[in-house]
Amino acid sequence: MQKADHFLILFFAALCGWAFPLQSIGGDGAEKILDAANPAGKVLRLGIAPFYSAPALLRTHHPLRDHLSRVLKTDVVVYSARDHERFLGSALDAGYDIVISPVHFLPMLAQAGFTPLVRYRAPLELLLIVRKDSGIERLADLRGRRIGLPDRLSLYHILGMKWLDTLDLRPETDYTLSETPSHMALLLAVHAGQTDVGVTGHPPLLLLDANVRDRLKALDVGHPVFPSLVTLAHADLGGKEIGRIRAALEVFPESPEGRRFFASSGYGGYVPATMNDVKQARSYEPLVRRFLTSSQDIAREPDGQ
């Protein structure tokens, strides 16, 4: 992968910012675990799947970065990638210590040494977004339209394609398929009239400017739901460090940063993630592998290095 393909979406936080004591982070037991000192100079690499653009990822996940840095007394650097393929490749090559990943990558991540810690409580919902003045009111109106999806390895793309198949709609025969690099780009393309329908979910809608969002609507088609994003940690961190990270995540929703994060994101807090989530996601793995564009190694280093 060329250096030009890499981008770091958040620089190291200031070293002096991590020295102050823990504040109101939960019960005595959790606080004692979290207060353990990290090795000097330790940096945690947090890789986030590129479901939003880099600026949107930076803005929405800043509270989580701040919380982990403060509680773990560790510099946290946030990484993403230009697309889901590069993100997955870097994760599989241990380019990240912690990842926030869609569920369809779980089996491959578990095989690569990642342990699931938590996932967001609110399920993801598959939505069909159109302009209010588009004249599209029901499923029958999709035929002959331009339908846009986020990048081909995103969960919304894979499930969107499967769902359109159940409607007996075939790409380039019954509709024109387009692909955008992110959910935000997709919604803006619908707003601008560059595509008629966007397949996405509720969280990206929350990030839109109100004037843009007010011109869009979701079709009432009985939208399917599926598990939300999962946070995992790599085994190379060691059991003690993974335990500290898990404890930090468990108290995040009740921290000042966590309350801001969940109020704005709509994710609804955390529930524990287990290997059972990995097992349930195994049906996605053949689809993921089919959508990969090359049989060669898809990445060898983390974006941002």
Image (cartoon, helix red, strand yellow):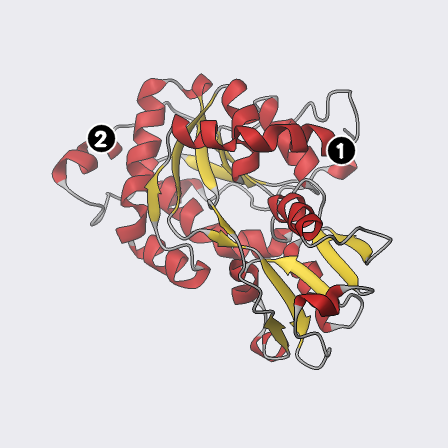
Q: x, y percentage for residue 83? A: 69, 42
Q: Residue at x 53, y 54 (%)?
A: 224
Q: Residue at x 31, y 51 (%)?
A: 253
Q: Is residue 242 left or right of residue 132?
A: left
Q: In the orientation shown, which residue stands out farthest toward the left? A: 28
Q: Is residue 135 visible?
A: yes
In which quadrant is the N terminus drawn? top right
* Along the line of sight, the residue nearer the viewer: 300 or 274: 274
Q: CA distance from mark 2 to mark 1?
A: 38 Å
Q: Quadrant of residue 69?
A: top left
Q: Write down the residue under mark 1.
A: 3
Residue type beneath disc 1: Lys
Q: Which mark is residue 241?
A: none
* Along the line of sight, the residue nearer the viewer: 198 or 171: 171
Q: Residue at x 44, y 37 (%)?
A: 231
Residue type beneath disc 2: Ile
Q: Is residue 198 above or below residue 277?
A: below
Q: Is residue 38 visible?
A: no
Q: Earlier in the sequence, mark 2 or mark 1?
A: 1
Q: Residues within 10 Å of mark 1 (few under 14, many from 20)?
A: few
Q: Is residue 173 above or below residue 106?
A: below
In which quadrant is the C terminus drawn? top right
* Along the line of sight, the residue nearer the viewer: 178 or 286: 286
Q: Write down the residue under mark 2.
A: 33
